[in-house]
Image (spheres, rainbow, N blue to C red):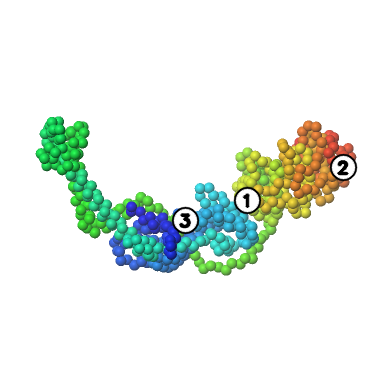
Amino acid sequence: GLFPNLLANGASGIAVGMATSIPPHNLRELIDAAMHLIDDPKADDRTMMQWVQGPDFPTGGVLVDDKDTIARAYVSGRGSFRLRAKVEVEREKGGGWHLLVTEMPYGVPKAKLIEQIAGLIAEKKLPILADVKDESDEAVRMVLEPRARTVDPDLLLESLYRLTDLEVRFPLNLNVLDATRTPGVMSLKEVLLAWLSFQVEVLLNRSRTRIGKIDDRLELLEGFLKAYLNLDRVIAIIRDEDEPKPVLIAEFTLTDRQAEAILNMRLRSLRRLEEMEIGKERAALVKEREELARLIESPARQRTRLKRDLAAVRDKFGDDRRTRIEEAGAAREIDWSAMIEKEPITVILSQRGWIRAMKGHLALEQVADLKWREGDGPFLHFHAQTTDRLALFASNGRVYTLAGDKLPSARGFGEPVRLFIDLAAEVEIVQLLIVRPDGKLLVASSDGRGFVTSGEGILAETRKGKQVVNLRPGASVTIVRPVPEAADAVAVIGENRKMLVFPLAELPELGRGQGVTLQRYRDGGLADAIAFQLADGLSWTLGGDSGRTRTEADLTPWRAARGAAGRMPPIGFPRSNRFA
């Protein structure tokens, strides 16, 4: 057809001793250039650049070669094009920013590019980049977070262009077969001229084929008209003769095809209106044949017809250019010494698992006044630093690690924490806290078992997290609390509202396990547990909005060995059975 498939869609392949690499181009530009060559076949090769700016890839991107480089490639038929992803610097409130990738270089899988960038981060080969996030749906949206707002965006971009497939080279090798099926490298103009020459040949062949079909049809129509002029005699011959066909041929000077067509006519066709329609069809076909004959004899008419048909294809299938042409400036020297700032943040986790980090240390009583999704509200919030690592404990006993500098910003409602870790929807979040490498944590499950674990031992390096608590069937992790450095006792309270205090030394320190029995229950399970210093007494928050606390200094009535049943708590202990 009239579609320049080789140049519009591109092609690549390797044969014995030769190869071809043709990038896709914009259909409008190709047809405009071809129509110019129809009028001026001897135009200079470089004039093609007035119409064909360069390759046009379906995935968009930015072509950063200068015009002279592109022109040399098209004139020689060999070269390459530097193609970059479309990247924008998105500014954030408060002076922050991130890079946003919205178009990929042609032929680069998004997953591969993300893997490349993640590898640079993991291997610390690009310290000024903190994170890469894929927020794509139908459209590409890849977010690259700098390590700090003070990082130079141009420096980060230039580094990524050099180290990843955010910039690639697409080769051009216009090695094609000519009309004699001889392979050779052509210029862009030569390829277009060869295609136009073929289109003229197709036009002539199509016209000759059409004339042949018109002649065949006119032959039949002439026979039909003779039949209508002698309709009664034709009917009589058909009724009376055993072999009417030779009689019709002899009497009305018909050809074999005409006689056969008359004999195959249906009775319903023997109406006056049909005779008139045949006359009109014959006149139209005669006119069309005359026009086709003039077209075959006239190169000027052929050029006019070809331009008209090409314009129709352009108008029907043409679209706007997707790949922008932007000449890149001179490459800058990369300074790899980038400051990674330690900044204060306020970590906020909602009841429905949306996490965000606000810059600075927000007064914790102001958290409830922030914007929340409908039906959502505050769950956990605390002060941290961008250099902190956070541990998220799930009810299934797994622990996930989050980096403070990679938490989503406080714009909007944040993001679901499940975007960062492989946490199933049915699994509940129990605790989120800062991991202190030398710190200890008290971990307990609903069936009243628990142990102490070290902060350093629970860190997980993958999205899948790390199994820390081995749970019995039906049990779940319910309590995770830091163990104060001076703590020497543990207080537990059951759902049966019985409290027990025993020495912290009676709990084992494990990296992973079920733990030991904290308290014995006849009904229900564990409600809360806390580690504290016995000399300071046991404190708890009073009910209501007063914010006041009460301390029980003498805990002798509740002290016993680990695994005892305990007794009713002090007067005034919250009905929620929670220490805090």
**Labels 3, 1: front one:** 3
| Residue 423 sits above or below residue 327 on the image | above
Q: Answer whether labels 3 and 1 touch (C-beta < 8 Å).
A: no
Taking the image as drawn, is residue 97 in sight? no
Question: Residue 310: image x %, image y %?
Answer: 32, 54
Residue closest to the far left:
251
Q: Which residue is mark 2?
A: 553
Q: Earlier in the sequence, mark 1 or mark 2?
A: 1
**Labels 3, 2: front one:** 3
Question: Residue 323: image x %, image y %?
Answer: 45, 57
Residue sitting at 29 percent across and 61 percent down? 39
Question: Residue 464: image x %, image y %?
Answer: 65, 48
Q: Earlier in the sequence, mark 3 or mark 1?
A: 3
Q: Residues within 10 Å of mark 1 (few under 14, many from 20)?
A: many
Label 3 and label 1: CA atoms lie apart by 28 Å
Label 3 and label 2: CA atoms lie apart by 71 Å
Q: Which residue is mark 1?
A: 408
Q: Residues within 10 Å of mark 3 (few under 14, many from 20)?
A: many
Q: How many marks?
A: 3
Q: Which residue is mark 3?
A: 60
Q: Earlier in the sequence, mark 3 or mark 2?
A: 3
The quarter of the picture where residue 112 lies is bottom right
Residue sitting at 47 percent across and 56 percent down? 60
The quarter of the picture where residue 190 lies is bottom left
Residue sitting at 25 percent across and 52 percent down? 207
Type of residue at label 1? Pro
Type of residue at label 2? Ala
| Residue 46 sits above or below residue 574 on the image | below
